[in-house]
Image (cartoon, rainbow, N blue to C red):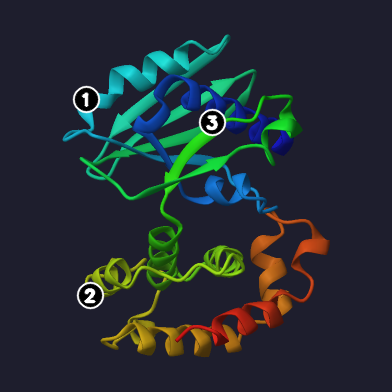
Amino acid sequence: MIEKEQQLLARVLDLFAQKFDKKAILRGGMVLRVLGSPRLTNDLDYVFVPYKSKKEIVDEIVTCLQSIEGASLTYSLNSKCLRVVLTVDQTTVQIEAKVAMDAETSTASTRLLSPQFNLPPRIIHVVDPSIALANKMAAWNERRLIRDIYDIWFILQMSVTPDIGTLEKRLRKPIYSRLVRDQDHFTGQTCSEFYDFMRAKVSDMTDKDIVNELSDYLAPQETAGLSLLFRAALARLK
């Protein structure tokens, strides 16, 4: 089932690249899959530009997904995004789309991912890596998931540094998960204080903690020794 989910995600990624080109900017975990990360993801996250309202993209996206043979779908709009639940041959994935008038982007190739699913490589547009890293750090602060730390570590391996403006903006107005206790909220003011805060939290993380949370996303050979690698990568942040 996991393999079928990954194949369907890759298929939608390929379809959107053809249909929407620069209008569809990939964000989230699938960007890292495109760049070679082995961590599995179960959804696709996009920002569509240039649009003022999410309502403007509904028909285009729904029509595009309905072109997949055997597809059935449901969708909903909320304050944050358009969410589509797509099912093909009893395999279900989720696609989320936000809108913006513009966005800082980079290009990437799907050449590391597409051949796994007998798809041709495509040039796609992705959120700028520095901004993606800043948002991933802020996401970790708000929900404290080890998979966010994994993604932070992966991006840091590419010599990317977080966009300070984006990170500081998110840190000023965090939206904490109810699972993050009040006493665990970050109370500092600067990015350097936040890096120290992250390092302190990760210093207590064990390989067992990592395996317990990431076993559905990574093979065992990918999780061994990650706690040391996490700490080494975060130690380089200034």
Q: Along the polypeptide, which appears first: circle 1 or circle 2?
A: 1
Q: Which of the 4 quarters of the picture holds residue 132?
A: bottom left
Residue 212 versus residue 159: which sits nearer the camera? 159
Kindly give the residue lying farthest to the right in the view shown: 221
Kind of residue indicated by mark 2: Arg
Cβ–Cβ below 8 Å for labels 1 and 2?
no
Nearer to us in this view, 237 or 43? 237
Residue type indicated by callout 3: Leu
Q: Is residue 227 left or right of residue 144?
A: right
Q: Is residue 98 left or right of residue 226?
A: left
Q: For numbered disc 3, what is the local secondary structure?
A: helix
Q: Where is residue 48? Give x, y as percent.
A: 32, 35
- Please rate how many residues cluster around mark 1, counting C-alpha atoms within 10 Å: few if below 14, some from 14 to 19, many from 20: few
Residue beneath disc 2: 172
- Tell me the distance, in whole angstroms, between the alpha carbons under discs 1 and 2: 30 Å
Q: Amino acid at mark 1?
A: Glu
Q: Is residue 25 above or below residue 37?
A: above
Chain-order first, disc 3 or disc 2: 3
Q: Residue at x 64, y 18 (%)?
A: 89
Q: Which residue is mark 1?
A: 56
Examine the image and state in which quarter residue 112 appears.
Answer: top right
Residue assigned mark 3: 13
Mark 3 or 1 closer to N-term? 3
